[in-house]
Amino acid sequence: GQAIIIPAYDPSKQTPDIEPDYNEGVAIKYLISAPTMRVPAIVSDTVNAYLAFRAVILAVKKHNSSKTLPYIRSVLVPGLGTAVGKMPKKRCAFQMLQAYETFEKSKHKFRTHPDSLCVVDDDDYKMSSV
């Protein structure tokens, strides 16, 4: 999966006025686009939520490594692939947790350094059948 971070408003201008009832009155600085599918399709039995959230995590890490850009401290994420893609909510949540633990907490080394293709295949099956 891939993700792109886009400024939510023109950075050369002052933060726009926002409704105080939304986001506790704090302007949202960025939009992160991380598609779960190329075209509308059923992705319920795929690892697409994992791949999309992995892309978000890696994009934020890259962004935050810059010394010139404002640091991203939190990210709000909808249920990836749960609407049009019909992925069950629990499966989506499980896949997002796996991506978080793997790429933010450095757990599950078998995903980043697998011993064999069988390990990857078994993990793919597990994540797509929860």
Image (spheres, rainbow, N blue to C red):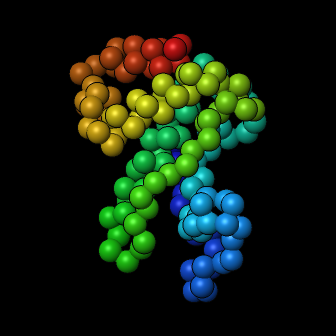
Query: Can residue 110 be seen?
Result: yes
Q: In this view, does 99 lie above or below 23?
A: above
* Res 6 seen here: no
How far from the left and from the top, in percent, is residue 8? Answer: 62, 68
Horizontal arrangement in the rendering, residue 86 relative to residue 25 (left or right): right
Residue at position x 37%, y 77% from top? Answer: 68
Q: How many labels does the image show?
A: 0
Along the viewing direction, whichever of 108 and 46 lies nearer the viewer: 108
Query: Quadrant of residue 59 in the image?
Result: bottom left
Tell me residue 103's x, y (percent). 34, 41
Pick the front one: 31 or 51: 31
Q: Is residue 35 above or below residue 108?
A: below
Q: Residue at x 47, y 20 (%)?
A: 127
Where residue 86 appears, as percent x and y from the top left, is 71, 25
x 55%, y 33%: residue: 49
Q: Residue, x 48% and y 48% (percent of image)?
A: 56
Direction from residue 90 to residue 19 in the image, left or right = right
Residue 98: % across, % down: 40, 29
Q: In the displayed structure, does residue 108 sit left or right of residue 26? A: left
Note whether 54 is above or below 8 in the view shown: above
